[in-house]
Structures are given as C-alpha cells and as structure tokens.
Amino acid sequence: MNSSLKILFVSSESIPFAKTGGLADVSGSLSKALSGMGHDVRVVMPYYERVKKGGFDLEKVSANVKHWFSGKLFGFDVLENRSGSLKTYFIRNDKYFSRKGLYGTSFREYPDNAVRFSFFSKAVLAAIEAIDFIPDIIHCNDWQTALIPLYLKNDLEGKMPYKDIKTLFTIHNLAYQGVFNRIFRQFIGLPARLFLSEGIEFYGQLNYMKAGIFFADAISTVSRKYAKEILIPEFGCGLEGLLKTRADEISGIPNGVDYSKWSPDTDGFIKKSFSPDDLSGKKECKIDLLDRVGLKFDVNRPVMGYVGRLAHQKGIELIAKIAEKVVGMETALIILGSGEEVYVDMLKKIQEKFSDNVRVVIGFNDELAHKIEAGCDLFMMPSRYEPCGLNQMYSIRYGTIPVVRATGGLDDVIIDVDENPAEGNGFKFTAPDETAFFEAVKRAIVMYNEGDTWKKLMRRAMLCDFSWDRSAKEYVKLYGKILSRCEGRGARDDS
Ligand code: ADP
C-alpha cells in the first residue's frame, strides 16, 4: 500500500467555515493534521449561507455538475478553498443549503433535512469525478453523511463506478441519528428493496445513522470509553443491538486539540497570554472576563465556567441545582450557551436570583468561549453522556480545572486529583445527580483555597498533551487496516 493516502473527509460542518459544535472542530483539525502528515486530504461540506457570507477565498471548480437524485437529474456547483495543502470543497445547491441555520432555526429542525442531506451525500459521490480525485477511503461523519456507504454499496442507478472505495463511518454523537418519516423514502428515491431492518429501516422509519453503521466498512467513535458505552442500552440509543453485531469493527479514537487555536500562550482572543512557567497573565484574563460579562466580583475568589449547547445531554439542570450552594461558597458562575428554551429559562432565573455571582450569556460566541476558558478557575461538565467532549481538553490547557462526570471522553481525559495526586488534572464524579456533582465542586473549591496545591495542579494540567498528532496517527492506522481487508460490506441485491 502506498504510504500516502487519498482521503475524502465528508462532514456537514468544519472550522473555520461553519460550526455548531465539536464536529466542526474535529473536521477542521483532523483533516489539517492528516494533511500535515503528507496525506492527500480533501474535505467536502455543503455551501451554507454563512460560508457565503464568511469572506473565504473560494474558487468555483465545477459548474452545474449533474447527478441523479430521486429519479431526476439535479445540478450543483463545486467551490474550492485552499489552505496550505488542504483543499475543502463546497457543494452548492442554494435550494437546500442557502439558509441561515445548518440544520434548522432555534425553534425547529428544517422539515426537509432528510432530503437535504440525502442530496448532499449523493452529490459528494458525483463530485468525485468533478474534482478528479478518486480516494482510497471516504471518511463519513455522523448521520448527515451516513447515506454515503449505503449509496456506494447499493448501486441505485446501475452505474456507480466507485463501489470498491472503502468507507469509515465516525459516530460523534449517537443520540442524533437522523430519524425521518418513512414517507421520505420516495422523496430521496430510495427503493423499497432497501427499506430493510438490515439497513436503514428502524421501527418503520428511516434512520440514516443506522444505515451508516450497517453499510460502512468500519466504524469509529470519538473516545475509547464511548466506544464501549454505546454497546449497552443506557448509551446505545436503540442501536446497541446492531452495534454489538459489529463490535469487532468499532474503534475508539479520541479527538484532539488544535493548539494553534486553543493555547493561552498564543490565543488572540484573550487579554494577556500566560503559560505554565508564568501564570501571571491568567489573573488579567480573569479581570477582563469579569468586566466583559459585567460582574463585580472578588478576583481572588473562584470563578466557574461553562460553554456549550444547552441540551439534556449536558446536565445543565445539575448546574442550576447546585448554583445556590456554590454561590454560598463565595464563587461566581459564568455560563455561555445556546439551545433548548427550558434551559435558557432555568439559567436566566438563576442569574436573576444571584445577580452578584452569576452571568448567563445566551448565544454562540467564539471570542467569549476563549475568554471563559482563559479567565475562569474551574470548568463544569456534568454531562449525562459525552462521546468525547473538547472543552475539558481546552480547559486544562488554560489551567482552568475541570469538574466532570466520569463518562465517555471526560472519563478518558480527566484524572481525579484526590484519587491520584501525582497525575491528577481535575475532579470527577460518577452518579448523575446534584449531590455527587456538588461534592466534586466542593472538593475543588477547598483545594482552590489552598493556593499552592492549586497552582501545582494548574501547571500539571496545562502540561497534558492532547494534540491531534497522536489521534491522526491512529486514524491512519485504521484506514490502513480497512484498506488491507480484502472484502468490504456486501450490498443488498434484488433477490
Ligand atoms: P458538542 O459537540 O457535544 O456540542 P464538544 O465539547 O465536543 O460538544 O464541542 C463543543 C464545541 O463548541 C467547543 O469548541 C465549544 O467551545 C463550542 N461551543 C459550544 N457552544 C458554544 C457557544 N455558545 N459559544 C461558543 N462556542 C461554543
């Protein structure tokens, strides 16, 4: 096998072009790391309105590429961005993608998401010829790209030239499966012979994630612990049975951090740089953060942060439940997030009640996210489940000690300092309730009050290395393993 691989990396979001969460960080950083290792990597994503408005340097490389979709010929353009050796392609079809949101508005998902991402998946395969790049492997990510393995392995129009290209399907979050009413089968032109429980059918509906898991040559997920967790009902979201049948082909490869973006010695968003050797700048970052969110608070007392989606997964109600006791320990809370109304209301009430100690900022704000990572002392991640999680890795880099629930990637990355004083980089709790969470927060605040022990903990945490290099090497090893296997996953035939 040639040591340099041709990798088509397909994702519905990627930094710096469009981001709603961790998937974009992973897509942008992993593709960059793979490209930096000398592999020929091409990223493909939709051309959203925010890409159009982002001022990126884009060149149209193909116009009106035709592909069969839902029994008709459709056209799309392909635009290209170059960043060093990495090329990112954008599939442009304004009817489906020129919208404000990626997947919906703050109130609801777009009702035609089944069609939009089925169109995208088919268009990616049609784009292979247009960009003149036949990959060794197509790396698909989450449900939005999960139909690619199905389309590859089941030659719907009888002229699929790429049947032998191998696929890796990465699950970034099993809870979001792309489940749609069966009526969409006709809209996406999926023949009845493929509407099978050995494939896309799931309790009478279409389940895109299920199709990806079924038809891909191999599956991966984003931490070692989550790779095991998804095999049991508590985390398997109904797909644990299918996943168990493929358990030998599931790998857990942890996400990494792009330290060119997330490091306190180079971060352009923060007030003053700092490092393990010179922590003095962190105090200025803390003062700047308090000022930015309008909190008049003693800079010598601990400030706890949260950045992320406001969703059930993230255990937001646990933060709300312990807020009073935390504030009672002369601690401030700064929360940045967007998401479900119920959590927005819950957090706003906490802010009203404890206005001297709590600030809640609703919205997506990259700059403030960096300021929170740099300016806080502690970072809260009481997630119910966390496939990998990035903020715990960002936090330790900034000496902002995480308090996390021991699940998925949080459990893999964080070592509890009370259990292992020599190697600890944070605080962990297990039971998904406020008593366990508060006990862990209390241990953290007690240690913060000890001064010198805290500084040692900060320095140790800051020196942990979760750069992409290690994970990218693991992906290359996995691609090699997939390619060296003689037989791929079989297609459904007409019989
Ligand atoms: P998930 O992918 O489940 O949302 P991760 O921890 O893997 O969670 O990644 C979330 C990423 O999105 C992080 O980079 C985080 O800083 C960022 N993020 C989430 N919400 C916001 C927000 N409201 N403003 C700025 N950045 C955010």
Image (cartoon, grey):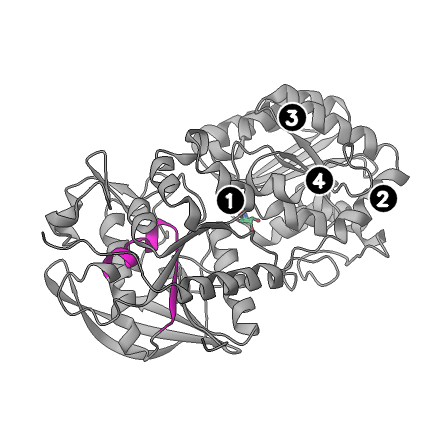
Q: Position of residue 301 (x, y in %)?
A: 81, 34
Circle on res. 455: 2
At horizontal 45% and vertical 48% (from top left) the residue drawn is 172
Amino acid type at mark 4: Ile
Near mark 1 (Cα within 10 A), the count class, few <14, some 14-19 or many ≥20, is few
Circle on res. 437: 3
**Can residue 296 be seen in this snapshot?**
no
In the displayed structure, would residue 186 be above or below residue 439? below
Classify mark 2: helix, strand or loop.
Answer: helix
Circle on res. 363: 1
| First to last magenta residue range | 135-151
Amino acid type at mark 1: Gly
Near mark 3 (Cα within 10 A), the count class, few <14, some 14-19 or many ≥20, is many
Q: Mark 4 touching mark 2, by CB under 8 A? A: no
Q: CA distance from mark 3 to mark 1?
A: 25 Å
- In this rendering, would 349 be left or right of 248? right
Classify mark 1: helix, strand or loop.
Answer: loop
Classify mark 3: helix, strand or loop.
Answer: helix
Question: Nearer the viewer's eye, disc 4 or disc 3?
Answer: 4
The residue labelled by disc 4 is 415
Q: CA distance from mark 2 to mark 3?
A: 23 Å
Question: Nearer the viewer's eye, disc 3 or disc 1?
Answer: 3
**Can residue 183 be seen in this snapshot?**
yes
Q: Position of residue 415 (x, y in %)?
A: 71, 40
